[in-house]
């Protein structure tokens, strides 16, 4: 670091921190859905990244339709596409839970293998429909460009939008989980499934809605992802390991833990990978997480759950 002046170090740190915030936003959007599915239901969904890719491809389709058939709607199509991405992934998740996952509850190894197979099938479907090359939707003008808070710091507007979307969605998930009737039933089911069923909660229906909601949130993550990167058939699989890392490190079924974990991992990766080599930075982050998990095996914010 000796070749940098103090001013350059400040600018580099500020820019890397913002890059870390962008990565934090994508990881958190991905992890929110996975934390609901894995934390609340105990389902290891290796196809979660493909539901994110489904949301991204939905935005791409909306972009193509808007530019071809309704040019007047181009400035606002992206907001509609976010809702469409949520619905497409949520409906796909509903179908997958009904047709596959419901037969595999309490069989974690079978669930893991089944969702891994599902992820391969979905990747091949994307490749058949959209081709092997990565695609990028045409973003509206208000998402393009950047602003400069100082001469050496450049902040992209799409990154700020993704962070705002992440904050809004995180607040919405918190309100849903802790201020809605269905959220109450979800938390009751994960704390004591037998007792929840005994007091009249339809736990099978709660499971279906939980899986569908988690997949829908992954779809929104895919919509956000299109503002900062291209989408390909295997785009979702690139983030699935980091997403599981966020959920496990934060503590399953803990919203606060997921947020803290995503923030810590994203910032550490962004800073370490700049000042060290990319691989060494990743190794440093993983070693830190392993050491912390040896001290706190249930993660940063472990919930007390009755069996």
Image (spheres, grey):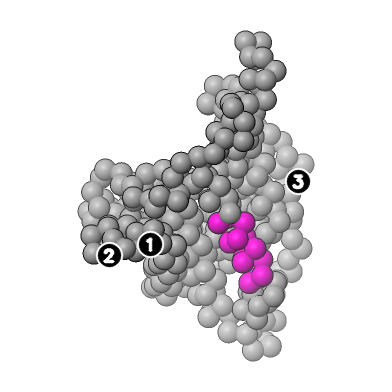
Q: Which is more N-terminal, label 3 or label 1?
A: 1
Marker disc for residue 77: 1
Contact, mark 3 vs mark 2 (Cβ under 8 Å): no
137 lies left or right of 203: left
Majority secondary structure in the magenta region: helix
What residue is at 38 percent from the left and 62 percent from the top? 77
Between the C-alphas of marks 3 and 2, the distance is 54 Å
Vertical side of 55 occupied by 103: above or below: below
Vertical side of 289 occupied by 222: above or below: below
Q: What's the magenta region?
A: 165-177
- The local secondary structure at tag 2 comes to loop
185 lies left or right of 215: right
Between the C-alphas of marks 1 and 2, the distance is 9 Å
Marker disc for residue 85: none
Q: Looking at the rendering, which quadrant does residue 201 occupy? A: bottom right
Front-most of residues 266 and 115: 266
Residue 214 lies, in percent from the top left, at 52, 64
Q: Which residue is mark 2?
A: 70
Badge 3: residue crowd in 10 Å (few <14, some 14–19, many ≥20): some
Does the magenta run of residues contain 171?
yes
Front-most of residues 98 and 147: 147
Contact, mark 1 vs mark 2 (Cβ under 8 Å): yes
What residue is at 58 percent from the left and 80 percent from the top? 203
- The local secondary structure at tag 1 comes to helix
- The local secondary structure at tag 3 comes to loop
Q: Looking at the rendering, which quadrant does residue 8 occupy? A: top right
Q: Which is more N-terminal, label 2 or label 3?
A: 2
């Amino acid at each position: 670091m000796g070749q940098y002046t103090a001013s350059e170090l400040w600018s580099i740190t500020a820019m890397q921190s913002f890059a870390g915030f962008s990565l934090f936003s994508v990881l958190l959007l991905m992890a929110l859905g996975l934390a609901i599915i894995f934390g609340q239901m105990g389902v290891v969904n290796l196809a979660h990244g493909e539901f994110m890719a489904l949301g991204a491809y939905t935005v791409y389709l909306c972009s193509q339709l808007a530019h071809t058939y309704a040019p007047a709607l181009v400035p606002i199509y992206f907001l509609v596409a976010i809702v469409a991405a949520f619905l497409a992934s949520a409906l796909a998740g509903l179908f997958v839970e009904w047709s596959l996952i419901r037969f595999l509850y309490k069989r974690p190894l079978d669930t893991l293998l089944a969702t891994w197979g599902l992820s391969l099938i979905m990747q091949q479907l994307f490749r058949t429909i959209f081709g092997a090359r990565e695609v990028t939707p045409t973003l509206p003008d208000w998402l393009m460009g950047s602003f400069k808070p100082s001469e050496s710091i450049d902040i992209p507007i799409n990154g700020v939008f993704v962070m705002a979307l992440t904050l809004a969605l995180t607040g919405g998930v918190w309100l849903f989980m802790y201020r809605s009737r269905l959220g109450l039933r979800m938390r009751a089911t994960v704390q004591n499934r037998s007792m929840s069923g005994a007091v009249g909660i339809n736990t099978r229906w709660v499971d279906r809605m939980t899986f569908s909601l988690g997949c829908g949130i992954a779809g929104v993550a895919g919509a956000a992802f299109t503002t900062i990167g291209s989408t390909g058939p295997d785009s979702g699989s690139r983030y699935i390991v980091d997403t599981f890392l966020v959920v496990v490190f934060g503590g399953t079924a803990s919203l606060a833990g997921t947020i803290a974990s995503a923030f810590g991992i994203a910032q550490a990766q962004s800073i370490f990978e700049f000042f060290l080599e990319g691989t060494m930075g990743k190794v440093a982050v993983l070693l830190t997480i392993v050491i912390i998990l040896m001290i706190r095996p249930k993660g940063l914010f472990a919930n007390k759950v009755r069996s």
